[in-house]
Image (spheres, helix red, strand yellow):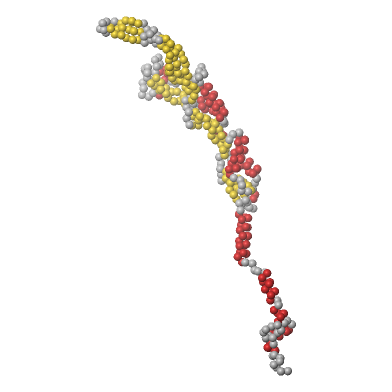
Amino acid sequence: MSDTMFPKREERVPYGGGKPVRNGRGEKEKKSGRSGRDRKQPEPQKKRARKGGRKPNKNMLYLIGILVVLFIIFLFVRKNGSAVYINEEQVGILKGTDVTAEYLTTTLEGQLESIVGSKVQINEEIKVEGIHIGSRNEKDVCTMEHLLPKMRNMVTYKVDAAVITVDGGRAVILANQEQANAVLAQLQTDLLPAEGVAADAEIGWVENVQIVNEFVESTEILEQEDALAVLKATTEVTQSYTVRSGDALYLIAQEYKTTVEKLIELNPGTDLSTIRVGQVINVPVQKPKISVKTVETQVLTAVEPKTYQTQYDDTKPSSYQKVIQQGKAGQKKSTIQITRVNGDVIEEKEVSKEIIVEAVPEIIVKGTQ
């Protein structure tokens, strides 16, 4: 046959293809028994495999890694407990973070009040701090039922008490208002005059005496008998005394329960060898912490003394004197106000009077020549 009818080997085109097959590659394909059509069929399958198995985004993996690390850190540092302190000393750890220092303080004070019978105020500062409970401090974790008794035995406290003050300063401290009022009532009774006072008498204190409530140390509270003794205790002070008719230095010393030597000591620069009516000297007196003052009025019927009138007659010699009208005393109803301090009278004054019988003046005529 002619060469034009059969192409050369290298120019032959496989069935279904459009390119000539080179010698080397065609030989291999013959040996393997695969045609050009068989070789191209798997291509679509590879493309489909790539579409279905997309590689994960690197940024997404990085973000997930960060989140995992943060979660692990959170597990190890999160605050899941509360450390309880009295001042700076840690006394226990509670699970959870809902407990507060205010709650612990209020609860402790309530328990102590039920024990001592009055309100209390804890001296120490109670603090609560959120912490992480881990393996190192897990042994210190306790329950509220265990912690409160422990804290109750560790704290000190002040109790609400009744304080009797005198002129703004503390005098004595009693457990409550009832005891304080009882002490003051007894003190008034003891300091009133032995003969008593009128039913309408005004009774009060010379000083500014009050009862106030304060939180104090329990050791400061006194029993009623001890408080009464403290309030009755006296200190020596000096006061003035005006010499009266019939006084003598030794009599004044006896009246004020002292000695003549003491009176001389209290009056330096004054000659007390002779005293005169109206002279003012210093005398010692014992002043208690509290003094009772009473003011009462008495209505007395008293004599209204007669008065004297003098008339002059220039026709009579100077030696002449004659009563031309006899005088006569009248009668009055007098209201006297009496002020006592601790039973001693310090003032008497007439506050009003009513004339019952008028006094008749006595008239005397005197000569002037």
- Identify whether 119 is placed above or below 290: below
Q: Can residue 16 be seen at all in this image of the molecule?
A: yes
- Snapshot quadrant of residue 113: top right
- Identify whether 326 is placed above or below 92: above
175 vs 341, left or right, is: right
Residue 166 percent across, percent down from the top left: 49, 29
Q: Can residue 255 be seen at all in this image of the molecule?
A: no
| Residue at x 46% of width, y 24% of height | 286
Q: Residue furthest bottom?
A: 2
Residue 133 percent across, percent down from the top left: 63, 51
44 vs 270, left or right, is: right
- Snapshot quadrant of residue 11: bottom right
| Residue at x 65% of width, y 49% of height | 139
Pick the front one: 260 or 49: 49
Pick the front one: 285 or 117: 117
Q: Name the image quarter holding the N terminus.
A: bottom right
Residue 315 percent across, percent down from the top left: 26, 5
134 vs 164, left or right, is: right
Q: Residue furthest right?
A: 33
- Snapshot quadrant of residue 347: top left
| Residue at x 62% of width, y 38% of height | 111
Q: Name the image quarter holding the C terminus.
A: top left
Number of callouts: 0
| Residue at x 60% of width, y 65% of height | 59
Residue 281 percent across, percent down from the top left: 39, 21
- Identify whether 284 is placed above or below 49: above
